[in-house]
């Protein structure tokens, strides 16, 4: 049996994180949650085995989602990242190769993207 994909959800909206986490767990993923970029970076540093990150763009703190995605790309270039936002278009400053999904996030599309990006069944 293949190991479950561990996905880090980063969003300052607790309700959104909870709903997204529940949906991913129901689809066979393990989920870790963080409320901002600083907490997420600490999770990545301290928890080996994170397979993918789904992050909001508009977050409080020193790093918004765009800065967070850039930092992830620099430190972990092979870590799959999916950015989400209430905006309907991807911001042009997203790093290359980072897909964007508008909220509300289409469940089946997110699951399919995560499975494809991580090679999980």
Image (cartoon, rainbow, N blue to C red):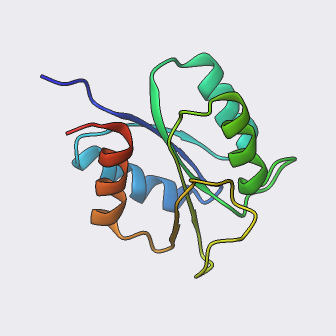
Residue 116 is situated, as x and y percent measured from the top left of the image, at 31, 47
**Dividing the image into 4 quarters, which one contains the N terminus?**
top left
Q: Taking the image as drawn, is residue 75 in sight?
A: yes
Q: Is residue 14 above or below residue 117?
A: below
Q: Give the residue displayed 27% in from the left and 30% down from the top.
A: 4
Closer-to-camera residue (55/120): 120
Looking at the image, residue 112 sits to the left or right of residue 83; the answer is left
* Residue at the extreme left: 1
Q: Give the residue displayed 43% in from the left and 69% down from the top.
A: 105
Q: How many marks?
A: 0
Q: Is residue 109 above or below residue 82?
A: below
Q: Give the residue displayed 69% in from the left and 60% down from the top.
A: 94
Q: Is residue 11 above or below residue 68?
A: below
Closer-to-camera residue (22/89): 89
Looking at the image, residue 88 sits to the left or right of residue 105; the answer is right
Residue 117: quarter of image: top left
Q: Give the residue displayed 87% in from the left and 47% down from the top.
A: 62
* Residue at the extreme front: 96
Looking at the image, residue 78 sits to the left or right of residue 67; the answer is left
* Residue at the extreme bottom: 88
Residue 121 is situated, as x and y percent measured from the top left of the image, at 19, 39
Closer-to-camera residue (119/7): 119
Closer-to-camera residue (74/47): 74
Q: Taking the image as drawn, is residue 36 in sight?
A: no
């Amino acid at each position: 049996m293949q190991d479950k994909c561990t996905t880090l959800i980063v969003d300052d909206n607790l309700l959104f994180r909870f709903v997204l986490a529940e949906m991913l767990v129901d689809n066979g993923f393990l989920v870790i949650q963080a409320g901002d970029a600083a907490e997420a970076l600490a999770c990545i540093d301290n928890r080996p085995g994170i397979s993918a990150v789904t992050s909001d763009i508009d977050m409080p703190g020193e790093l918004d989602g765009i800065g967070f995605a850039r930092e992830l790309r620099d430190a972990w270039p092979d870590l799959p990242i999916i950015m989400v936002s209430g905006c309907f278009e991807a911001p042009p400053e997203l790093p290359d190769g980072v897909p964007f999904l508008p909220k509300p996030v289409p469940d089946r599309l997110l699951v399919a993207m995560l499975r494809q990006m991580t090679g999980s069944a």
